[in-house]
């Protein structure tokens, strides 16, 4: 059994800029390693990350030392285990179920996707990230949560404020001021629309929670809706931008995907290639071995699904490449275990089955003239920050 | 050891030797049975290991399992179960598990 090796060289700034070569080396040399700058232990191999997520008794989500609580002004379901987590999650899960996606969200999303894609100017170069990926994700989410009154811009800003707060491991008070402001605005909106949700119940998450036979406490409904805002915009936004980038920088695959209409496969490969949520944190509840490394009780581990998704043990030497037509293997972008992404089916349906076919039916000859102009960024969450494409 | 038979919607079937203590879901994954995805790895959180079992030996679905079955992609019937919630024992020898019709 080995002690946890220490990596003093790698910084969060390195991982934010370009994590993949670093993870590749870690998988090979130090698959369980303490990162000196954060004190946390990075776990980069697929078999270990999956095992950690699927054993919540050993690897708890309940970690009072993360900045999530101040950012959301609540102890949210993301940081709970067991029955408590299940009760809160199941309170809104019906809104994201395949049945309700089919009955409510699929048609609505198709209309919204058409509306937002129709605004894009043919023949011009636009930033698809700001002009499509973000606002359409915000709009559908507003409907799914029952917050139609919120504007796209508000949803996007609240989401970013919550994410920045939740990732504020340096406890910079300025970032919490921003998330506090967002919380105040969201709380005011929630309060204002409760009467409507009660008098006109629908399948949105807020409505389903408010009108449940045994409702969870109101404070937890608020926290749940905020979690969905924090997680429900950047992930589909980044996934869409990543998939479009992958297709446009691999023209042979792009042509073949159009020919076969295998947009579902393009979706899965995009989220495998660059997982929108790259990292998850867990608290170790007992002394344990991860591989041949001894990890002590109360340590904090970070599972790097971004790395697991490119693990040579599963993908051979080609995991770093975007390849829609690779041999299929389950990826870990939606996680595993009790915290498996509640929005996985929504994402597959909306992006894979509606947005991608629609977007490339409208602009089959879309091009990305200069891929080097696309800036990629992010450690916890990752995706392109811009996507200047020409629409044809 | 117990023999479990998985039957696809088209009628094709495959009988496998299941290890006691594994779940039906783990048995299906170990033998690459089509139609069982088990994205959440057995945490009763995704309903992608949904199957139909008409056999009293497997008992009834718990309340949590029933709630999650409501979120299954495919048609839910009285015989619907999450295969991650059923543990293989010798007593289940000869069990027949039907897979759902994939939804387009």
Image: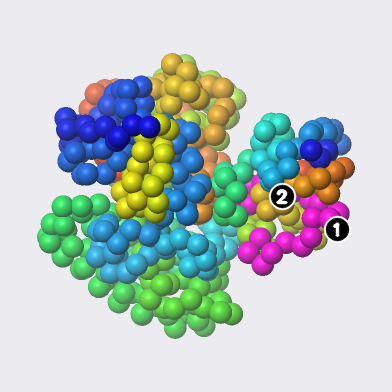
Q: Which mark is residue B87?
A: 2
Viewer-nearest residue: B42 or A266: B42
Q: Position of residue A36 (x, y in %)?
A: 19, 38
Viewer-nearest residue: A31 or B35: A31
Q: Describe the element under mark 1 as helix, strand or loop.
A: helix
Magenta-drawn segment:
B46-65
Q: Position of residue A87 (x, y in %)?
A: 52, 68
Q: Residue at x 30, y 77 (%)?
A: A188
Residue contact between numbered discs 1 and 2, judged by CB atoms under 8 Å: no
Label 2 neighbour load within 10 Å: few <14, some 14-19, many 20+: some
Q: Residue at x 41, y 44 (%)?
A: A288
Q: Quadrant of the N terminus of chain A?
A: top left
Residue A160 vs residue B20: left or right? Answer: left
Q: Position of residue A200 (x, y in %)?
A: 53, 78
Q: Which residue is mark 1?
A: B56
| Structural distance between the alpha carbons of marks 1 and 2 | 14 Å
Placement of B82 over or under A270, stated as above or below: below
Magenta residue check for B49: yes
State which chain disc 1 sits on.
B
Q: Is residue A42 visible?
A: yes
Foreground mark, 1 or 2, reads 2
Q: Considering only order in the chain, which callout, 2 or 1, is on the residue closer to the N terminus?
A: 1
State which chain disc 2 sits on.
B
Q: Quadrant of the C terminus of chain A?
A: top left
Label 1 neighbour load within 10 Å: few <14, some 14-19, many 20+: few
């Amino acid at each position: 059994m080995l002690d946890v090796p220490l990596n003093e060289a790698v910084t969060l700034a390195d991982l934010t800029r370009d994590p993949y070569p670093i993870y590749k080396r870690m998988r090979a040399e130090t698959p369980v390693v303490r990162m000196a700058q954060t004190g946390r232990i990075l776990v980069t191999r697929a078999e270990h990350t999956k095992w950690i997520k699927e054993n919540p008794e050993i690897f708890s989500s309940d970690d009072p030392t993360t900045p999530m609580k101040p950012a959301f002004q609540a102890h949210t379901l993301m940081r709970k285990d067991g029955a408590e987590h299940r009760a809160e999650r199941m309170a809104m899960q019906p809104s994201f179920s395949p049945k309700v996606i089919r009955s409510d969200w699929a048609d609505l999303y198709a209309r919204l996707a058409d509306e937002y894609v129709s605004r894009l100017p043919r023949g011009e170069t636009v930033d698809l990230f700001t002009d499509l990926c973000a606002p359409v994700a915000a709009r559908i989410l507003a409907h799914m949560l029952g917050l139609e009154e919120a504007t796209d811009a508000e949803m996007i800003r609240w989401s970013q404020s919550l994410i920045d707060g939740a990732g504020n491991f340096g406890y910079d008070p300025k970032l919490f001021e921003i998330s506090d402001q967002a919380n105040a605005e969201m709380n005011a909106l929630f309060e204002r629309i409760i009467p409507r949700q009660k008098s006109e119940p629908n399948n949105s998450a807020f409505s389903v929670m408010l009108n449940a036979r045994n409702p969870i406490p109101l404070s937890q409904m608020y926290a749940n809706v905020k979690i969905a805002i924090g997680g429900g915009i950047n992930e589909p936004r980044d996934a869409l931008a990543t998939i479009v980038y992958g297709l446009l920088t691999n023209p042979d695959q792009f042509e073949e995907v159009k020919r076969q209409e295998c947009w579902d496969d393009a979706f899965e490969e995009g989220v495998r290639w660059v997982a929108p949520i790259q990292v998850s944190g867990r608290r170790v509840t007992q002394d344990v071995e991860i591989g041949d490394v001894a990890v002590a009780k109360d340590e904090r581990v970070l599972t790097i699904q971004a790395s697991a998704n490119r693990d040579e043990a599963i993908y051979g030497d080609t995991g770093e490449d975007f390849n829609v037509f690779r041999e299929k293997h389950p990826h870990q972008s939606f996680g595993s275990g009790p915290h498996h992404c509640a929005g996985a089916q929504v994402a597959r349906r909306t992006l894979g089955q509606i947005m991608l076919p629609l977007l490339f039916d409208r602009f089959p000859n879309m091009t990305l003239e200069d891929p080097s102009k696309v800036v990629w960024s992010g450690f916890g969450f990752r995706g392109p920050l811009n996507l200047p494409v020409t629409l044809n | 050891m117990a023999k479990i038979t998985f039957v696809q919607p088209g009628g094709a079937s495959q009988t496998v030797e299941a290890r006691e203590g594994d779940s039906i879901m783990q048995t299906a994954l170990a033998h690459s049975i089509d139609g069982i995805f088990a994205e959440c790895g057995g945490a009763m959180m995704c309903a992608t290991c949904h199957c139909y079992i008409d056999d009293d030996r497997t008992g009834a679905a718990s309340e949590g399992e029933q709630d999650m079955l409501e979120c299954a992609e495919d048609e839910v019937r009285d015989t619907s179960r999450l295969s991650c919630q059923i543990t293989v024992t010798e007593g289940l020898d000869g069990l027949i598990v039907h897979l759902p019709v994939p939804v387009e």
